Structure formats: structure tokens, C-alpha cells
Image (cartoon, rainbow, N blue to C red):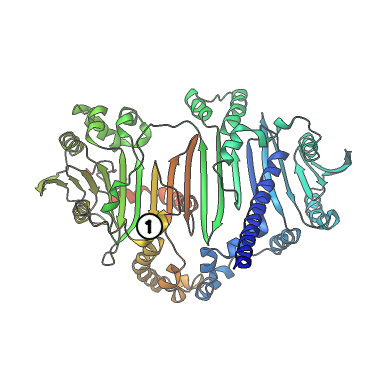
Amino acid sequence: MKRALLLLIAGAGVAVAAWYAVHLATFASNEAVAQLLPRGTVLLLHAPDISRTRNDWHQSDVYQLYREPAVQDFLRKPLSRVTRTGAAFQTLKEIEELNLTDGFFALTSVEQTNLKCVAGFHFKGSEQEAERVIGKWRTHLLDKNTNAKRETIEYERHKIDTVAIASFTFASAYDGHWFFAANDLAELKAMLDRADQRNKDQSATLETDESYRAAKAHMPPNYAALFFLQPKTLAQQLQSLQGAIGSPVSPKEQSFLQKINSVCGTMRFDNGKMHDVFFVGMPRIDQTPALTRSSLNLGSKDTVFYLAAMLNVGEKIDAIAQTPAIGDRIQRLFQTFAESGITADDWKAAFGLELGSLADWPATSSWPTVVATLPVLDVGKASKIVDAAMRIDEDSFWARTERDGVRYFSMQSPASLIAITPTVALSDRVMVVGLSAAAVEAAIKRSRSSDAEFASGQSFKTAARLVPPPTNFFSYVDTALLYTRLDSTVRPLLLMAAAFMPGVSEYVDLDKFPAAELITKHLSPIVSSQRYDRDGYVLESAGPVTLNQAAIGFAGIGIGVAKDDKTRGILPKGFPGFPAPSPSGTP
């Protein structure tokens, strides 16, 4: 028995030692790059272990979905039309052979129009083996630029290889198992000095920079990629640059940038999911109470999207009314408030700060219904504000009814692409706004129920535990349910479109479109939370893709959609905050 206990204790000790060794090695690796860079570094991109990241990617939910045989079969035709260059695949293979770690790129300074950049990585094997690969890249650069001049410079037992192309210089050198490159010879020499510890001023490195250390304190020790930016340093250098070209930075822009000490972010893989941490080091903007997510009980088993955020309209109502970028109808809404004698104090007394938004998509509906909510603090003042909002457009008519102590304001929309009924419901606890009377009434009923169907669901509870409790912002997207509903709505439309456009079959075979069940088994919710933590705002997001990654993807689509303002024509004339179609029917 004693021997078994001793073995158990020894095993636990070995596990703890292994865990500590791995984390210590990771910490040392991450800090090694910071020790190579100057204190005033403006931008840093760092990938600590490319091979590990590739392996983690192959275990991710998204990659497992991509490798499904049915998905591969469906993608075969569209992927066959994608040009694959042998050179690109050869380069990737060569990078794998080098087994790169601690790859980094840094912008060390911005001086007038001169950007000074450095880069490097740690490689496995000998310098001769690495040069067989790196030498090919250097030769390729020379072959493409026949006027380039190549020179070798001796510096502190190092051979610096320089390639000069017009005003551009590419300098590179080896230092043991490190390869370094820069577009400025002096910058490369300074980095070699730091690598060889010839620099006696240890406080002159990025590692000792207060902003960098404060930002890294919010980052996980293990990550696939990191970026770090010092906007304050960049702003100072850009100010002198813009002043030199006659375009000075405005006092407001300068003041805002000066408040931001650092911006830092990481991405990592966590049990098949992607996890982002994004930090902005700056003083707290608003001293608001913590987010309570009081609108969670308005959700249902069909909720595909939920958002809660602090929206301090009362503090900014005058500034919003004078902002031209918000649109004509929003300005008219705030002008109506002013004409009705509604002040910022009235708004703060009427409504709470927490904005909620939910999208429900029942299986019986072709499209989701979206509602927005605000807590009601004073129903009398809130009624005055809602009554004023109804008068934003004299041509619109809002029907007023009251049921079970709740006032409803509804407007029948004119004939449009999608029939909608803008509705506002006002109770003594909450205001609900939506484009469907049925959805608003259902939300009001759930707000009075003690059955938290959505918040108590296992899917929501599991996802919410992936991120820390929020204080400023929280969002949740049920990607599996969302895809199921999209599939049932869009698939028939796609098949119909293919029947009328036979040419589509040359690009994609819609008959092979994977079943929804096969897709959704690899999908989990995307959850995000933002909080203010000590010295800055921290946004964390986790899921098959993160909120930031999804936003970047949809931004590309949104740019194209935004060019066609005709989509505004589906919104009813007279609904507060939404543009109305012109008399001619065009936007």
C-alpha cells in the first residue's frame, strides 16, 4: 500500500514537472523574440511553433469538417478550377523541412517615409541545411531583379548577406540556429548585438517595455499566433510624418490614440475550437455597472443569436444627435426628442444601460425574427420617449393597444419585398422592439416567465463557460441551429436556381451538397465576452471560428452588399432609425 502511494506521488511529481517544463519552455521561447527587438517596436507578429500549429489545425473542428468524404466530393469540382502553383507548394514543403519555430516580423520604427522592418525564425538542423532552402529564396529574388547588387559584409564573426535593389535593401545573417533579415543594415546589426548579448543596456529591449509586459500579462502562455501594436508610438511617429506632408493629425484623433497604450491579440486551438484573446490597454471609458445579461430569459429553444452590451445612450445623446455619419432618420429621431423636451437626463431616468438583442428562428419559419430590448426604469418617462419616437414621420400611423399592462405600438408596413410589422412593446420592466408583432409579444411573455428555456440549455451553458464572465459585451451564435435553418430555407432556392441556370453545374454540383446533419455535427456555438480587466479591455471569443474571424469573413461579403443600397427598400417608411424609400421607389 505504501509502495503504491509512493508511486502515485512520484507519478504526480513527474506530471507537474513535465507541465512546468513545457510552460517554462514556452515562456522562454516567447520572451526570446522580445529580447531581440528594440524597446520602441511598433508592431510585432509572432508564430512560436508552426509545426505544432499545423498539427492543431488538423485536429480542429473546421478541418475535420473539410475532410469529410461528402464535403470533399462536393468541393472536388470547384477546387479543380483553382490554380495551384507548384512553386507555392514547394515553398510550403521547404518550410516544413526547416521545422521553423519562433517566426516573427516586426516594424521597429517609422521615420518619415522610411519603415524599418526586421524578421527571423529559429530552424532545426545545421546552417548548411537551412541555407539550401533559404539560398533558393535569395537566388529567386536575384533572378527576378537583374539590377540587384549582392554583397557580403563581415560583422562580429557574422557574415551579413545584402541584396540592394534600387532604394530597397535586404540584409540577412545567421546566428547559430537563428536566421535574421531586415530592410536596414543598421537594424540587422543591432539585432545581432542583442542576440549575442553585446548590448549592455538590457532595458532597451521590447521585453522590458511596460506596455508590452502589461499586454502579455493578459495573453495565454501557449498560442498559435500573436500580434502586438503600440498605437501611441505609431501615433507620435505618424504625427511627425503627416506634419511633414502638410496633413497634421486632428487634436481629437491624437488625444484618442494617446490613450491607447497597446493593442495585443492571440489565437490558439483549444480542444478543436479556435480561441482568440484581444486586449486594448487604455483607461476605462465609462464607469458603468457590470453586464447582467438580464435579457437572457427572453430567449427560447429556437434562439440562434443573442447579444448583450452596455449602451450608455443617455450620456451621449447630445453628441449622437450632432453626428452627421449616423444618417438622416436617426438625426430626425433625436431632433424629435429635442422638440418634445426630452433631455439626456430623461433618457437615463427612463431606461437602463444594457441593450439586448435576440434572433429566434423556429423550424416553421422561413426567416428569423429579431428583437432588441432595453430595461425600463421609469415607465412614465419611457412612455414619453416612445410617444415622441412615433412622431418622427407624420405620414406613418402607429396603432396603440394595451394588454395585461403592456403598451403596444404597431405599424403596418406598406407593400414591400418582405411583409413586416414594426412593433414596440413597453412594460414596467422592459422595452422590446422588433419587426414582427408576434415576435415582440412572444418576447414579452417570456420576460414574465420564470422558465429560462434558452439560458438553461446545455448548449448555451457549455459555450458560456469557454469565456470569462463579461462586464461590457457578450454574444452567442448557435452555428449548428443557424446552419440547419439556413439549409432548409436556402437549399430549395439553390436547386431551383440551378434548374434555371444550367451553367452553374460547370462550377458546382448541387446534387452533392452535403446533408445538414453531416455539417452540424462539427459545429458548436460561437461565444464572445468583453470585460475591463485592471488596465484595459479584454475580448475573448471561442468556437469553430471566432467572432473576429467571422466578422472579417462577413466584412468582405458586406462590402459588396453595401454597394447596393436598394436593399433599403424593404424597410418601412416611418420606422424609427431605418431609412425610408424615396417617392420614386429608388433609394
The foreground one among 324 and 193 is 193
Question: Measured from the top left, where is residue 501 in percent x and y?
Answer: 42, 70
Q: Nearer the viewer, residue 447 or 438?
A: 447
Nearest the viewer among 232 and 270 is 270
- Residue 560 lies left or right of residue 115; in this view the side is left
Residue at figure coordinates x 29%, y 31% from the top left: 314
Q: Which of 399/199 is in front? A: 199
Residue at the front extreme, as displayed:
2
**Left or right of 124, for residue 520:** left
Quadrant of the frame with the N terminus: bottom right
- Asked whether, in this view, residue 70 is left or right of residue 91, the answer is left
Q: Is residue 47 above or below residue 347?
A: below
Residue 40, placed above or below residue 570: above
Asked if residue 251 is positioned above or below residue 577 in the image, the reply reads above
Amino acid type of the residue that numbered disc 1 sits on in the rendered structure: Lys
Q: Please tell me whether mark 1 sits on a helix, a strand or a loop.
A: helix
Q: Which residue position holds label 1?
A: 461
The spot of residue 282 in percent (x, y) is 50, 32
On the image, the x and y values in percent for residue 452 come to 27, 56
